[in-house]
């Protein structure tokens, strides 16, 4: 037979003071932004992303990236990419902060698989920074592609 133990089912409902927030008047947000003098060209932070199919010439790529990052490194906060290099099935994983960059391959990067048979060899590159010139970046990158003669 079931002994119905006498559980005391009185839950003490503490009186939660329902967070009375002092709603401050947000008047101070209405101060007009006086310091918005237009700066010489838009110095806002932005990003330039590229997706380009094809294989890259590693020598050209290193030269272009090296020059680009050494001249523009202060403006470039982050850069990263997955790249397809001629003559190898390894994906190249590129990461940079300002001028410091690392290039690894899928062989030594966990979670990155080599290019598969029939997989589109799509290079993806992103630069995040200020005063980025999309045309300059695209042009430089395209010059690194191996030309099909």
Image: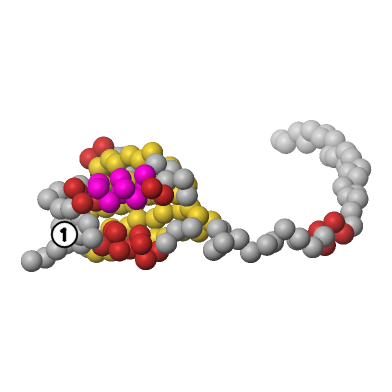
Residue 90, given in percent of the width and then of the height, sits at 20, 47
Q: Residues within 10 Å of mark 1 (few under 14, many from 20)?
A: some
Q: Is residue 131 above or below residue 149?
A: above
- From this viewpoint, is residue 89 visible? no
Asked where in the image residue 84 lies, by quadrant, the reply is bottom left
* x and y percentages locating residue 144 in the rendered image: 22, 57
Q: Is residue 126 above or below residue 99?
A: below
Q: What are the residue bounds of the magenta stretch? A: 62-70
Nearer to us in this view, 61 or 18: 61
Relative image position of residue 3 (x, y in whole percent): 76, 33
Q: Is residue 26 above or below residue 20?
A: below
Q: Residue at x 39, y 60 (%)?
A: 49
Quarter in which the N terminus is drawn? top right
In the depicted structure, whether residue 26 falls above or below residue 112: below
Please give the name of the residue rendered at 79% of the width and 33% of the height, measured from the top-left corner.
Answer: 5
> What secondary structure characterizes most of the magenta part?
helix
Q: Nearer the viewer, residue 136 or 10?
A: 136
Quadrant where the C terminus sits is bottom left
> Furthest residue to the front?
40
| In this rendering, position of residue 19 left or right of residue 126 | right
Secondary element under disc 1, as helix, strand or loop, is loop
* Residue 22 can be seen, yes or no: yes
Residue on which disc 1 sits: 146
Residue 118 left/right relative to 76: left
Q: Say which of 131 and 122 sits in front.
A: 131
The answer to whether residue 69 is magenta is: yes
| Residue 58 drawn in magenta | no
Q: Residue at x 12, y 50 (%)?
A: 87
């Amino acid at each position: 037979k079931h002994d119905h133990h006498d559980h005391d089912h009185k839950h003490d409902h503490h009186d939660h003071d329902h967070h009375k927030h002092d709603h401050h008047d947000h008047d101070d947000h209405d101060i007009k932004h006086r310091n918005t003098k237009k700066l010489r060209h838009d110095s806002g932070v932005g990003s330039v992303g590229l997706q380009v199919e094809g294989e890259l010439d590693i020598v050209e790529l290193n030269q272009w990236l090296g020059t680009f990052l050494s001249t523009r490194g202060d403006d470039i906060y982050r850069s990263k990419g997955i790249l397809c290099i001629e003559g190898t099935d390894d994906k190249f994983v590129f990461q940079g902060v300002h001028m410091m960059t690392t290039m690894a391959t899928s062989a030594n990067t966990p979670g990155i698989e080599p290019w598969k048979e029939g997989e589109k060899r799509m290079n993806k590159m992103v630069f995040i920074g200020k005063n980025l010139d999309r045309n300059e970046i695209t042009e430089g990158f395209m010059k690194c592609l191996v030309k099909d003669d």
